[in-house]
Amino acid sequence: MSSPASAGPVVAPPQKVNLRTPEVMSAVQEQVESHYRSDIVDKVRRNGGILRVGDVTVRLAKQFGFCYGVERAIDLAYAAGKVFKDRRLFILGEIIHNPEVNEQIRSLGIKNLMGKGKEAEIDDLQPGDVVIVPAFGTEISTLEQIKERGCQIVDTTCGDVMSVWKRVRKYASESATSIIHGKAEHEETKATSSRALGNGQGHYLVVLTLAETDYVCDYIRHGGNKEEFLEKFRGAYSSGFDPELHLRSVGVANQTTMLRGETEEVQRRIRQAIMDRDGPELAGTNFRFFDTICGATQERQDALRELLDVKMNLLLVVGGYNSSNTSHLAEMGEEKLPTYFVRNASRLLSTEEILHYNLHAREEVVARNWLPEGPLVVGITAGASCPNNLIEETLIRLFELRGIGREQLQAAA
Ligand code: SF4
């Protein structure tokens, strides 16, 4: 990709603009609420999260749906649409992992520069264009390209993601390789990986599963076949990464939306491997970790754990299928009871059939006979990127399938 800064005159950086003025934010609030709010969900929440009509009971998790980081990102994107209404507006991929929200962002005239559904090229950006950085952040190189083009940047990166960046930068400054528990292709992990390089001296390796962690641990303890290692983790380590050299001193961090239990296990296994290799004293120098699961992810996992203690017939998890924190909620549910991960209400096809995302097959599949007859208790939760209006529609559809209409629900809520 060509760089106008190196090819032509230096472009002056745009002036900082405060988007969060009271007038703008009050207009944003109104619009955001009209798109994503739900009266029914708000009422059920206020009534202890239980809605009972006839022989159907719905129990909502105590924490679900939009987190503070997502709310802030959406507010800023809507504010950008108002403050820069005469400029061209772009976004670096999806603002969050929810197709309905992304569709709303598109409807505001904001064009996507990356990934699936890309509508424009970074190369075509001009000074004065506005570029929104999503809640997961972006890679340093991408940010540089945009700055070089003199664009106005609206950075919605969540503060919790930036905390992970701070941590991996510190590891790099201590010449420790960052081992990142996450998905190598996830936007947040790519953004974090780019910070793990520090000033060029740092390295990173991304591990996703405990099986991958065990492979790395074996290598730490006994060495192994370097070519095989590099092939196995292709696309998940920094340029020039050498397992012989760069697993001597490591620091573990994680994508903010992983399962806490699994992340802790990754840390524990790597620490043990370093201790086995170096002994306890040196392990203190060669191993460091910092828990970077965000508060919102933690709260949603804790709330679901509590909900799963209640006897229920099934669980509905509502949200985008590429949402990491939502997928983990579905995993937690699957361990306990029939769980259906649905994008929205349209997936509840009939009392016989539901179209849901199978995490293992990584595709939507139809399940039959999913809705039992007779008294029914259904748990509902949703990931940090799911708006309340989608939860409401799912709830309404569920009751509708049992012959209970919207008016009855509104009266009972
Ligand atoms: S899920 Fe966590 S890290 Fe992601 S936007 Fe929400 S609060 Fe921030």
Image (cartoon, rainbow, N blue to C red):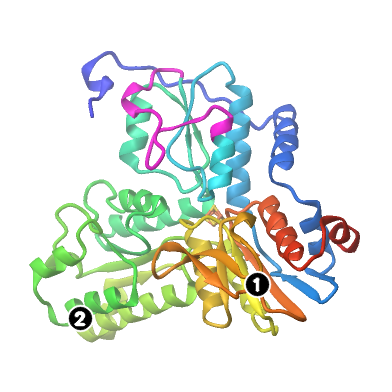
Q: Nearer the viewer, residue 363 or 85?
A: 363
Rendered image quadrant of residue 237: bottom left
Q: CA distance from mark 2 to mark 1?
A: 36 Å
Residue found at x 60% / y 36%: 76
Q: Mark 2 near ligand 1 (CB under 8 Å)?
A: no
Q: Nearer the viewer, residue 87 or 266?
A: 87
Secondary structure under the numbered disc 2 in the rendered image:
helix
Would you name the residue on which mark 2 appears?
A: 218
Q: Position of residue 345 (x, y in %)?
A: 64, 56
Residue found at x 58% / y 50%: 69
Going by the image, does 179 lie left or right of 322? left
Observer-side mark, 2 or 1, equals 1
Which mark identifies residue 303? 1
Q: Where's ligand 1: which quadrant?
A: bottom right
Q: Nearer the viewer, residue 280 or 200?
A: 200
Secondary structure under the numbered disc 1 in the rendered image:
helix
Residue found at x 63% / y 39%: 75
